[in-house]
Amino acid sequence: MMNGDRMVPVLGEQEFRDLMAGVCAPVTVVTTADGGVPYGATVSAFASLSLRPPMVTVALDRASGVLARITDTARFGVNVLGRSQDGLALGFARRGTDRFAGVDWHLDSGLPRLAAAPGWLVCELDRVVDGGDHLLLLGTVTRARTLPGAPLVYGHRTFGTHSAYADRLHRGIRDQVAACAR
């Protein structure tokens, strides 16, 4: 393929998939509500974007039903899943099912929040950016809640967690300060 005056090699789709499978990504369930009905989907294309103002990015497939609801309501929630929540991730990835059936959730700031998720963000949609077969949502974070726990990540086509985080003992800040003072 030509890009200006230089030849750019075309990367095969499977080669790109295989490469990206080795990149660990956080696992989230992105939610919204429209007309009192909850909508949600598993998303691993999630990242922090800005500190001032606090912003995140989420990428959703153009065919996603959740995407259409988010663009209509201009709001979305991000449930950051913990190490043992791969069942939730799989449930919210399935098409054609009631993804909220049997799931403990409630409305928080008008958005569906999964009760057991250790991370929660409320976002106002700032803008939508074209990204090939996906759209990148830029959201301003208006509320956040974090509980301790190892995160759920997806890499090499399987769920897991950051092993060093999962295995370490969590000492209190006083213990850490005391250790540094010695």
Image (cartoon, rainbow, N blue to C red):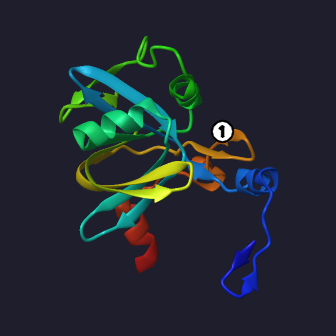
Type of residue at label 1? Phe
The residue at 55%/29% (across/down) is 93
Numbered label tally: 1
The residue at 52%/45% (across/down) is 150
136 vs 93, left or right, is left
Task: From the viewer's side, name the closer residue of 96 and 77.
Answer: 96
The residue at 32%/33% (across/down) is 69
Circle 1 residue: 159
The residue at 58%/31% (across/down) is 86
10 vs 124, left or right, is right
Q: Which of the 4 quarters of the picture holds residue 115?
A: top left
Task: From the viewer's side, name the closer residue of 144 and 16.
Answer: 16
Helix or strand or loop: what does disc 1 sit on?
strand
Residue with the most extreme bottom position: 5
Task: From the viewer's side, name the closer residue of 94 and 52.
Answer: 94
Which quadrant is the N terminus positioned in?
bottom right
Residue 31 location, x and y as percent? 36, 34
The answer to whether any part of residue 116 appears in the image is: no
Residue 96 location, x and y as percent? 53, 16
Q: Within 10 Å of the Cα at label 1, are there few (<14), some (14-19), or many (20+) other Cα atoms? A: some
Residue 147 location, x and y as percent? 36, 43
Residue 171 location, x and y as percent? 45, 55
